[in-house]
Structure formats: C-alpha cells, structure tokens
Image: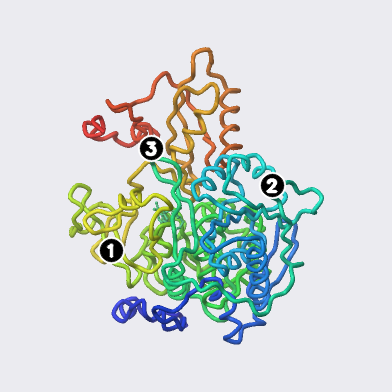
C-alpha cells in the first residue's frame, strides 16, 4: 500500500495543515527540528527503533536507536552551550558522513543555533568564503580536515571554536577543543531551546551566476514540507529502510538525508564512502534497503556497469526509487525498470525550495524524461521569458516559477535580502530553470536560465571559479562555463588568457587545474582548459560566458544584441 492513493485525490484534499496535525504542531507553539527528529519518536514509542545504520569505506559499522540519537544530540547541545554557543549563532558542520554529522545536526538545532553544513571536500578557499559570509562562530570537524581550517582561521575573527571529534588533546592548538560524542556525559532531561516556526534553522550555501555563493536561510517550520513530501513522494513507511545517497553538505542530504526520514520516524542507512557500483549493490543487499533516493549521475554510472552486476545481487528489498539534482534522462528511467524492475521517480527542487516541489508520484504513470507534476500545496507554472506571464500553450518553454509561501521556502539569503528579492517577478518566485508543461500537466525540464554549472547534481558558480583562477600568477582573465559530459551532465571548462611572459603548455594547464581543485574542490576544478588571447565581452566589459557555453553544446549563440548592451 502506498501512502498516496491518487494524485488527484491528494490535490483535492491537500492542505499543509494536514502535516501540522500529523506532527501535533499548533500555530504559535515552539517547533524544533532537532526535537522532532529524535525526542518525538521516543515519545511515540520508537525509542528502541533503529534510526541510523552506518557503515564507512572500511566496512566499519555503527547502529543508533532513536533514543541514542536523542541522548547524543542532547549531549552535543549541552556541550555547545557550555562552550558558549548562543541561539542563532552559526555552527558549521565540516565532516564526512560520520554519525556525528547527522546527530550533531540535531544537537545544533536543539540549542536554537543555526546549522551550516559544508561539503567536507571543500578546500580552504571555498570554506573561507562561506564561513566569512555567515560570520560563523564555531565549526565541528574531523582531524583529517583540520589542516584546511587551520589555514584560514586567522582571517576569521568570528570563529571562536573549532571542535574536533576524533583527535587527542595534546595535538590541539589554539581555539581547538575535543568533542568526542560518545564520551560526553549523558543528558536525559535536556530542554530544547524553544525555537518557533520562523526561527532560523539550516543555512545552506548555494551558487549563483554572480558573486560568491549565497546562504539560503531555512526555518524550523520547513519540517512541515519535508515531513509530508517524504511521506507522499518518497513514500516512507513504518518498516522502510531508507537510503539517501546525498551528502548533508548539500540540501538533499539534510532535507531528505536527515529531516525527511527522521520526522517520519523511519530507519535510515548511511554509507560513508565514494561511488562504487558493486559496493552500492552490496550495501542495498546487506541492509535490505527498501526506498532509495539517488541522483542521475550515479544512475548513469550504474548503467555503465551494466545489468549483469545488478543481477549478481539480491536487491529484492527495493520497492521505491527516486532521483534528484539534474535532469533524469528517459534512458535512465527505462534502464532502471529493466535492471531493478522499478522506475526511478524524478523529483525537482532546489536549495531555496527546501523540499520537493515537482515530481513523479508513486503510482502515477511516468512519462520517461518528464519531472512529473507539482506537489499539492505548490502552485507551479512556467512564465513567458519576456513578459513573466504564465504560459498557457502546452509545450512552450518558459521559466519555472512557484507561488511564494510554501513552508520550506527559504526566508532570505544570509545578509543579502536584495539578492533574494531579485528572485521574484510579477508575484512569482523564479527558480532559474527553463521547462515546458505538456497538455497533461507534466513538466519537462529544458535547462538552466543562467550560467551556473550543474556537475553531477552539484551547482558550481562561475564567479567563484574565476575568482580562484585569477589568484594564479599566470592568469590574466578567465571565463568558467559548462561543457557537456556523458556522466556528470556538465563539467567545468575554463577559457584563460595568460599574463605576458607566460606560455601556454600542458603542464601549465595541469598546474592551474590542481590549483583550483585544492583551493575550492574537485567539483569546481576545470576538466578542460583552453588558452585564448581574448574573451568575448559585452560593451561594458562583462564576459559572455553564454557564447562560450553555446559553442561547447553546439547550440546557436542566439541574439547577442541585448547581451551586448548589458
Ligand atoms: C538546481 C538546484 C534540490 C536538490 C539538489 C540540488 C537542478 C534539481 C532537478 C531535476 C532537472 C534539476 C535545477 C535546480 N535540478 N533537480 N529533477 N531535473 N534539474 O539543489 O544545488 O539548489 O540545485 O538543480 O537546475 O534549479 P541545488
């Protein structure tokens, strides 16, 4: 039995208050994500139910019940308070997918502080930009990532504490404090800080075309949407064993890697390890995964390794598959039906939406290649590219737009209300993507409406890459843009004009690539560099990344007359 009987019925009867009621939330009362994901499950008789089954790349395993995650998040919360962390201060989580990341997330929220998860593969510069912007007070990290933090700490006056989960006292330096979760005193009666619906909760950094990444600011009320979308889209149920591939450094890994499953009281499994088809199938087989939330790039890699490998494993536990992050190509849907006997269900959303907004619902006929239909409670349309009026002609491409006001919508960009306001036109929130709607109301993704690069489901901003490139002594100017890629959909390409005295060479290319990888991350590293003598620009000197991108995609460059006057 699915949670959803029919899409039409759900639409007819839907109201967000259904989720409020199911979560026993009444308007005006405190609401705290940390409490909902742990304490509430214990109060509902699930104290001894398994919340987290964890395994790392070495095969080391750990298991936590809901009572364990309640107590450990209490302990972390108490510890942070004792260390002087105040409500609404930003606490960054900079860790691999270790249990402390998931439980620490709840602990930070329980004291009313704002949790800022950052991808542990980030280099010092990516880390610095985000910690500086958020004026982060503390960071929780692992010994293996400490050197990156140490490189930048002196330029971050707000950063008072660095908590290390797995070090020894003697090797710690100034401001560094040991935080060993399992050795902290147990705290049965921790009082959660009374956060309310509009209290800030999670701060996720996301890339745009211009400027450095922006801090998308979520609130505790977002749980209303994350809970009910996890219930109706991921179809999470009492006996499920759920697996979300995403890293909590990105929004999927928090909205549906922590809040969605745990607000539903569902057991989840976490694999702290890189991609490997064989390993993934073994993981599904071993933990009897029932619901799997993955991403197109991963699915394409699985496809590449073929169905024979699938058949060598017992994956019969699987019952529902979903995907997010990039367009899910029709071939991947068709392949998954052959390989697993189940279709991947595409889900569309963004850091800013906090929860799934357009999707293929369980049981709804899938048109392979389509993203499906809006979640009930979400008013979605496509707007004319010029007039910003809703398009009524089926199949005509426009901008994906949503009526503001759903529970998990971000409330602003951190310290950048102006940037946030730019996302609205004509009373609509503009997602920044293009799509069309067919005569059955299914949405079809076309592409992004800006210069942001989507590599394997991760957005990287050209500005951040270009800024890093400019720090290299040989680079005079550069443009970073997307190049098509069979697996990652897009990868970063950079066109670079060299300073006088520097000669183009293969060695220099490798040196520059490595330079960006170390400063930012492997994702942001250009996979290809082309040395040029000049870059196409508008009359006012803005680099026309779109022209370079169009060349890579073999697309028409289009009308440049408007761009020229930018
Ligand atoms: C952008 C948001 C929220 C999940 C992770 C990414 C692209 C996301 C789809 C999809 C085509 C998709 C869009 C979107 N995207 N899902 N199902 N089909 N494109 O969150 O980093 O904020 O990126 O990812 O371009 O705007 P994000």
For the residues labelled 3 and 1, the Cα–Cα distance comes to 32 Å
Q: Are marks 3 and 1 in contact (CB under 8 Å)?
A: no
The residue indicated by pointer 2 is: 146
Q: Position of residue 36 (x, y in %)?
A: 53, 76
SS state under label 1: loop
Q: Where is residue 143 in the image (x, y as percent from the top left)?
A: 72, 50
389 to the left or right of 131: left
Of 277 and 238, nearer the camera is 238
177 to the left or right of 470: right
Image position of 94 with respect to 26: above or below = above
Image position of 308 with respect to 18: above or below = above
SS state under label 2: helix
Q: Quadrant of ligand 1?
A: bottom left
For the residues labelled 3 and 2, the Cα–Cα distance comes to 40 Å
Q: Residue sitting at 56 percent across and 26 percent down?
A: 509
Of 255 and 60, nearer the camera is 255
Q: Residue sitting at 69 percent across and 47 percent down?
A: 146
Outermost residue, right direction?
170
The residue indicated by pointer 1 is: 403
The residue indicated by pointer 3 is: 553
């Amino acid at each position: 039995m699915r949670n959803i009987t029919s899409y039409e019925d759900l639409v007819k009867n839907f109201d967000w208050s259904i989720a409020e009621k199911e979560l026993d939330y009444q308007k005006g009362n405190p609401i705290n994500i940390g409490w909902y994901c742990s304490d509430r499950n214990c109060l509902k008789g699930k104290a001894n139910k398994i919340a987290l089954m964890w395994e790392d790349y070495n095969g080391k395993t750990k298991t936590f019940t809901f009572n364990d995650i309640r107590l450990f998040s209490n302990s972390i919360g108490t510890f942070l308070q004792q260390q002087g962390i105040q409500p609404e201060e930003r606490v960054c989580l900079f860790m691999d997918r270790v249990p402390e990341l998931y439980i620490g997330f709840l602990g930070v929220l329980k004291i009313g502080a704002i949790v800022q998860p950052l991808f542990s593969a980030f280099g010092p510069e990516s880390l610095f930009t985000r910690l500086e912007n958020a004026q982060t007070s503390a960071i929780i990290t692992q010994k293996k990532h400490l050197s990156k933090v140490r490189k930048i700490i002196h330029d971050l006056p707000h950063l008072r504490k660095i908590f290390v989960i797995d070090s020894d006292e003697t090797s710690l330096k100034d401001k560094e404090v040991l935080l060993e979760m399992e050795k902290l005193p147990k705290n049965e009666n921790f009082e959660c800080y009374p956060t309310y619906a509009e209290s800030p909760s999670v701060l996720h950094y996301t890339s745009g075309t211009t400027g450095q990444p922006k801090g998308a600011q979520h609130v505790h009320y977002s749980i209303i949407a994350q809970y009910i979308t996890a219930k109706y889209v991921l179809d999470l149920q009492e006996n499920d064993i759920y697996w979300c591939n995403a890293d909590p450094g990105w929004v999927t890994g928090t909205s549906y890697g922590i809040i969605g499953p745990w607000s539903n009281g569902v057991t989840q499994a976490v694999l702290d390890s890189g991609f490997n088809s064989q390993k993934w199938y073994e993981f599904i087989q071993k933990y009897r995964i029932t619901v799997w939330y993955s991403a197109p790039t991963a699915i394409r890699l699985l496809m590449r390794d073929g169905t024979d490998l699938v058949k060598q494993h017992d994956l019969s536990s699987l019952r529902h598959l979903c995907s997010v992050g990039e367009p899910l190509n029709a071939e991947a849907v068709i392949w998954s039906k052959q390989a697993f006997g189940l279709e991947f269900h595409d889900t569309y959303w963004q850091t800013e939406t906090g929860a799934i907004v357009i999707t293929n619902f369980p049981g709804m006929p899938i048109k392979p290649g389509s993203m499906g239909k809006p979640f009930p409670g979400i008013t979605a349309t496509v707007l004319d590219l010029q007039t910003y009026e809703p398009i009524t002609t089926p199949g005509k491409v426009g901008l994906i737009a949503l009526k503001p006001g759903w529970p998990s919508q971000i409330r602003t960009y951190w310290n950048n209300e102006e940037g946030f306001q730019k996302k609205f036109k004509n009373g609509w929130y503009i997602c920044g993507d293009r799509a069309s709607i067919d005569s059955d109301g299914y949405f079809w993704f076309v592409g992004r409406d800006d210069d942001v690069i989507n590599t394997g489901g991760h957005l990287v901003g050209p500005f951040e890459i270009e800024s890093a490139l400019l720090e290299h002594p040989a680079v005079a100017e550069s443009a970073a843009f997307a190049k098509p890629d069979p697996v990652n959909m897009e990868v970063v390409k950079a066109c670079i004009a060299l300073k006088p005295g520097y000669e183009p060479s293969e060695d220099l290319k490798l040196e520059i690539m490595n330079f960006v990888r170390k400063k930012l991350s492997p994702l942001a590293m250009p996979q290809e560099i082309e040395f040029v003598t000049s870059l196409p620009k508008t009359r006012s000197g803005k680099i026309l990344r779109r022209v370079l991108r169009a060349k890579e995609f073999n697309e028409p460059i289009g009308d440049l007359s408007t761009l020229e006057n930018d």
